[in-house]
Image (cartoon, rainbow, N blue to C red):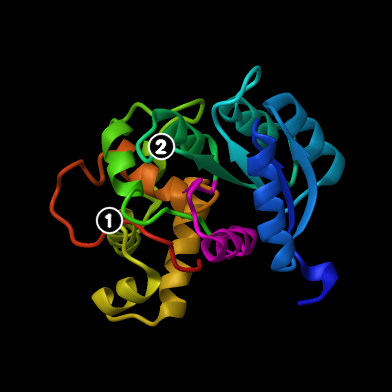
Amino acid sequence: MTVADAPRVVIVDDQALVRTGFRMILAADGIDVVAEAADGDAAVAAVRRTRPDVVLMDIRMPGTDGLEATRRILADETAPPRIVVLTTYDLDQYVYAALAAGASGFLLKDVTPEHLTAAVRLVRSGDALLAPAITRRLVERFAAPGTGAGSRPAPHRELATLTPRELEVLEALARGHTNAELAARFRLSEATVKTHVARILQKLRLRDRAQAVIAAYETGLVTPGSDGSGTAGLGGAG
């Protein structure tokens, strides 16, 4: 990877030690940290100034918190960065609200260095990051059919635009299946699965798989506690 190809990242956290640690980890793997911020207002300003690819966003900070900063960044930018929420809590309604507002996933702050750098590259490539064994429980706890979360309405009307196969793929995706598992389940190539996922996102006007999972629950396509194998993990590309 050339320097020009390196992901450009803004780190947002009110603890200087956390920012320093993450900066060192990312820099050691060739990822360019272009700015740091200690609160939401500074984060919005840093994003406007540096135009990063990815923002690592703490939620609970003095003043403007990470949730409001996420909403402002994604609403203001014509080509917004991917936002990954950082949290010390594995079940947090603020994290869910951030995902519903358009964040591309979340990580616990005790993430390993290898997982952190892989996560940055994953979301930079356009995919969503769903922390292993946590996301489905998070969505099931806070999603309510037809209500939406944050400022984004549930896209229930657009479900009618999906083909029967696309509805099946969305339901299985919401249960945490990777592209490889979807391909095996429906006896399709992974390329065809990626095409189905891309069309689902386009028709429902969603940014990535994280929002697709939330939409499936909010619209009632998948209900909490319903039968289904697989747990949410790192989504496959697409």
Residue carrying label 1: 175
The structure residue drawn at horizontal position 27% and vertical position 39%, both measured from the top left corner, is 140
| Secondary element at image label 1 | loop
The image position of residue 206, as x and y in percent, is 51, 47
Front-most of 42 and 178? 42
Q: Is residue 183 visible?
A: yes
Mark 2 / mark 1, whichever is N-terminal: 2
Q: Within the magenta stretch, is there residue 155?
A: no
Front-most of 32 and 219? 32
Left or right: residue 74 versus residue 190 is right
The image position of residue 28, as x and y in percent, is 72, 66
Position above or below: 112 against 12: below
The structure residue drawn at horizontal position 49% and vertical position 54%, both measured from the top left corner, is 111
- Residue type at mark 2 is Tyr
| Secondary element at image label 2 | loop
Q: Which segment is the magenta one?
A: 104-126
Q: Are marks 2 and 1 in contact (CB under 8 Å)?
A: no
The structure residue drawn at horizontal position 77% and vertical position 29%, both measured from the top left corner, is 42
Q: Within the magenta stretch, is there residue 117?
A: yes
- Of tags 2 and 1, the one toward the viewer is 2
Bin the neighbour count of mark 1 within 10 Å (Cα to Cα): few under 14, some 14-19, many 20 and up: many
Instruction: Determine which of the numbered discs, if any, sits on residue 60 in the image.
Output: none
Quick one: which residue is furthest to the top in this view?
Answer: 63
Bin the neighbour count of mark 2 within 10 Å (Cα to Cα): few under 14, some 14-19, many 20 and up: few
The image position of residue 14, as x and y in percent, is 65, 30
Front-most of 203 and 106? 106
The image position of residue 211, as x and y in percent, is 45, 46
Quick one: which residue is furthest to the front in this view?
Answer: 17
- Residue type at mark 1 is Arg
Position above or below: 15 against 159: above
Residue carrying label 2: 89
